Image (cartoon, coloured by chain):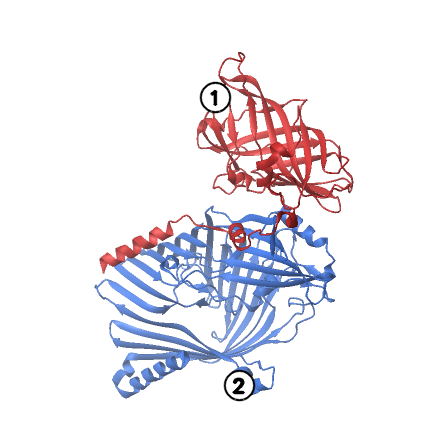
């Protein structure tokens, strides 16, 4: 119903545009993209040997409409239809439902109104479903916390989850912009389909218990806990894990807010240009962190010799204050690289993790483990980088990143990364080779993504590439929550080769 | 409009300044109250007896009292006051007898400043400090593997405790750091201060943030005939360094010189769900009095 309403609105607006001289007031853009992916390994799936198959067969239609009913006002609707291309029907009755045979969904990326110069000349505001982008670094923006991240497609790791906001901008001078944003309702980040593997209990091929995820506890507690299960016959343990997330209540207390002061300074002919921002954010970290876990040991109703371990974990989104600063400097001469950086000082909510072992639903007080998962101590996430255009066909960008998108100062900790990217263009920019990656400097795992884009005709692109993860899929240290390799662990996703075709208008 | 904006900002700021804390263990205790009977769970019943089965093996859970005597010089009080540290801990020996896991519970401290004249009142400035709840609940642990699996007697072994510091290349012998920024110093009791916090009550008052190393060399200990207790002697060393304090005078740490006599440990078999709180509340009656 909601989808239909939005389609009607868009169609109505288009109709209105045709019916009058509104054509001058309407901008219509979008793209159509086909995306085919193939898994190029067989060891990163739930079970060894699963791989070398199609992972995606997707078609996206994106429509973006801008309407200017008045010179000072703008309405924007950005919507996407996505057809997944895989049959999901498994029973005969489902064959009569198109949504099972040819599943699709609809996503409203943005839908807002923007007004300039109201109610005061030096004031703008935007209200509606928005995607905000703060910070000056290239994609790794620790000061950008208003929208949650959309990692549902790991290859599109710059995507964000839109949210309803009220944004007010004030321009006291021509070099200073003050922005305030209020986000009434918290939204979490979308995780990749592989995320559940981070909490999966691994079994041998014959179904015997092999390994459970390491909880965020001290080494001594983990040793004791592992000892508890080590005493049992692994072939007589049946794990039923479930991970829940605790959604913050929909009240004002859980609303989010942010303010930013942005300075744009022209340092003169010999000084270059400097953008500088200071920001403050109050809200929640959009990736969940471990909060509780319960392992309830009950005799299996099917086989009394087997012990069922009903493992239920809870995760929460910790609250935080973020004091941020960022800059971008463009030098006045071509032979100097551009510099940018941002730093976020995060004051987190303390989260104490608790793990209880229950026998037949009764808490065993001596088997209640606890440990601080997120200490109250403030911590820093930061990015600093340089970019440089060597020639018209060679561009390079290198960033040092402290703390990945999903990293908080929990027991997994903040890691250090190097993220280089090189772009080469040939044949009058019709061919573009991009070699990019992210390298974890702590555990030496990496994600690499070489890609070739060919502009077939203007506005039509063909892109082929590989997205590969390098690193150990098994924990480097099974008795440490931080023992998982960042890009090596299975939860990060599959290594794929892809082919995309895209037309934009 | 302006007024509402100000109120909105103030309300947001007020919420933002709350003391944030999410405690998983508290949630678990609320969600899963231990409703089983004492007999079912092995917990201590109200009459003070312990429902624990005798065994001729050391595997299981033990309550421990470790008494360490030393001297300490306290300016204007005594040059060598006799100090008694009574460490209370839980110890767990796994079924394979491969080692022992110690968990710190509490450490009552007594400094003997008995006046020379018994008619004089006790010295009100007698040193006194207590372990705050944050440290008691921090779960300070020490795992000691036995040289070979033990079955029916506790082998002589060494327990190394480190408080407030970790990752020392030589944990048993390296000098302890004396700065909050030194490598390895961490907020083990999660109270926002480096190291661990000790509450000093007398003669000065305040909090001392410190790192500490304690080494116990425990003698072999045989099980009693009923398999419920074991006792032995120990030698020990204690080193402490202040890495901060809320009163600068508290950063001065008086060294403890161990005495050769009177250092003992007692182990008492307890049910698997016996807690530190149980031990702290009942240790006076749990162990036989020592002369």
Nearest the camera: A437 or B20?
B20
Task: Estimate the spatial distance between the alpha carbons at disc 2 and disc 1, rounded to whole Å.
Answer: 84 Å
Secondary-structure class at tag 1: loop
Q: Is A446 placed above or below B71 here?
A: below
Chain in red on the image: B
Q: Is residue A320 left or right of residue B7?
A: right
For the C terminus of chain A, the quadrant is: bottom left
Q: Position of residue B85 (x, y in %)?
A: 60, 28
Give the quarter of the image for residue A205. Answer: bottom right
Chain in blue on the image: A
Q: Residue at x 38, y 55 (%)?
A: A281
Callout 1: residue from which chain? B
Give the number of the mark in front: 2 or 1.
1
Q: Position of residue A436 (x, y in %)?
A: 54, 64
Q: Residue at x 36, y 55 (%)?
A: A277
**Which residue matches tag 1?**
B125
**Which residue matches tag 2?**
A97
Badge 2: residue crowd in 10 Å (few <14, some 14–19, many ≥20): few
Secondary-structure class at tag 2: loop
Badge 1: residue crowd in 10 Å (few <14, some 14–19, many ≥20): few
Q: Position of residue B230 (x, y in %)?
A: 72, 34
Q: Is residue B17 left or right of residue B97?
A: left
Callout 2: residue from which chain? A
Q: Is B216 placed above or below A399 here?
A: above
For residue A330, say whether it is visible: no
């Amino acid at each position: 119903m909601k989808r239909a309403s939005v389609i009607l609105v868009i169609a109505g607006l288009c109709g209105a545009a045709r019916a009058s001289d509104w054509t001058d007031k309407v901008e219509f853009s979008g793209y159509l993209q086909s995306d085919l992916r193939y898994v190029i390994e067989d060891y990163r799936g739930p079970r060894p040997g699963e791989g070398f198959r199609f992972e995606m067969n997707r078609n996206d239609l994106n429509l973006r409409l801008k309407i200017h009913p008045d010179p000072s006002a703008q309405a924007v609707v950005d919507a996407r239809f996505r057809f997944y291309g895989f049959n999901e029907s498994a029973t005969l009755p489902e064959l009569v439902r198109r949504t099972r045979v040819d599943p699709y969904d609809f996503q409203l990326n943005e839908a807002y109104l923007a007004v300039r110069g109201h109610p005061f000349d030096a004031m703008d505001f935007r209200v509606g479903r928005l995607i905000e982008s703060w910070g000056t670094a290239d994609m790794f923006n620790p000061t950008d916390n208003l929208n949650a991240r959309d990692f549902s497609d790991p290859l599109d790791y710059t995507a964000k989850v839109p949210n309803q906001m009220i944004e007010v901008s004030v321009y006291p001078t021509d070099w200073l912009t003050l922005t305030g944003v209020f986000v009434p309702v918290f939204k979490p980040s979308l995780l990749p389909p592989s995320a559940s593997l981070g909490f999966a209990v691994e079994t041998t091929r014959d179904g015997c218990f092999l390994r459970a995820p390491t909880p965020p506890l001290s080494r001594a507690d983990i040793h004791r806990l592992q000892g508890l299960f080590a005493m049992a016959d692994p072939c007589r343990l049946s794990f039923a894990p479930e991970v829940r997330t605790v959604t913050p209540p929909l009240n004002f207390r859980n609303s989010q807010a942010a303010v930013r002061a942005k300075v744009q300074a022209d340092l003169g002919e010999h000084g270059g240009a400097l953008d500088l921002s200071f920001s403050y954010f109050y809200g929640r970290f959009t990736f969940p962190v471990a909060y509780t876990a319960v392992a309830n040991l009950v005799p299996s109703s099917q086989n009394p010799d087997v012990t069922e371990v009903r493992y239920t974990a809870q995760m929460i989104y910790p609250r935080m204050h973020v004091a941020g600063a960022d800059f971008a400097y463009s030098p006045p001469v071509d032979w100097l690289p551009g510099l940018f950086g941002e730093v976020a000082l995060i004051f987190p909510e303390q989260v104490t993790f608790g793990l209880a072992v229950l026998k037949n639903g009764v808490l065993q007080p001596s088997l209640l483990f606890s440990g601080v998962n997120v200490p109250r101590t403030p911590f820093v996430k930061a990015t600093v980088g340089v970019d440089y255009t060597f020639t018209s066909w060679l561009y390079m960008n290198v960033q040092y990143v402290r703390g990945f998108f999903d990293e908080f100062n929990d027991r997994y900790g903040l890691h250090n990364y190097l993220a280089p990217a090189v772009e080469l263009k040939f044949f009058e920019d019709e061919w573009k080779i991009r070699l990019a990656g992210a390298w974890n400097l702590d555990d030496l795992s990496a994600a690499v993504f070489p890609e070739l884009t060919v502009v077939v005709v203007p506005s039509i692109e063909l892109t082929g590439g590989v997205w590969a993860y390098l690193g150990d899929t098994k924990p480097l240290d099974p008795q440490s929550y931080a023992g998982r390799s960042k890009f090596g662990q299975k939860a990060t996703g599959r290594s794929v080769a892809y082919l995309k075709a895209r037309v934009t208008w | 409009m302006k007024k509402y904006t100000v109120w909105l900002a103030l309300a947001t700021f007020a919420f933002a300044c709350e003391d944030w804390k999410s405690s998983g263990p508290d949630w678990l205790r609320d969600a899963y109250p231990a409703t089983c009977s004492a007999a079912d769970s092995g917990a201590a019943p109200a009459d003070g007896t312990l429902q624990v089965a005798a065994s001729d093996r050391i595997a299981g859970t033990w309550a421990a009292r470790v008494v360490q005597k030393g001297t300490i010089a306290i300016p204007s009080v005594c040059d060598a006051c006799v100090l008694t540290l009574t460490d209370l801990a839980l110890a767990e020996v796994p079924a394979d007898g491969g080692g022992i896991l110690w968990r710190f519970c509490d450490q009552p401290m007594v400094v003997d400043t008995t006046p020379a004249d018994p008619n004089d009142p006790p010295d009100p400035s007698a040193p006194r400090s207590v372990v705050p709840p944050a440290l008691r609940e921090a779960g300070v642990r020490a795992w000691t593997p036995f040289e070979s699996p033990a079955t029916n007697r506790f082998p002589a072994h060494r327990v190394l405790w480190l408080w407030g510091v970790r990752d020392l290349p030589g944990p048993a012998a390296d000098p302890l750091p004396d700065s909050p920024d030194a490598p390895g110093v961490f907020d083990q009791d999660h109270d926002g201060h480096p190291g661990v916090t000790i509450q000093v009550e007398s003669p000065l008052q305040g909090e001392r943030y410190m790192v500490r190393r304690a080494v116990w060399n425990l003698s072999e200990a045989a099980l009693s005939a009923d398999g419920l207790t074991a006792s032995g002697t120990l030698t020990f060393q204690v080193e402490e360094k202040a890495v901060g304090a809320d009163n600068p005078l508290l950063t001065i740490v008086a060294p403890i010189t161990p005495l050769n006599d009177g250092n003992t440990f007692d182990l008492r078999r307890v049910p698997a769900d016996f807690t530190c709180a149980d031990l702290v509340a009942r240790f006076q009656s749990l162990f036989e009095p020592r002369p």
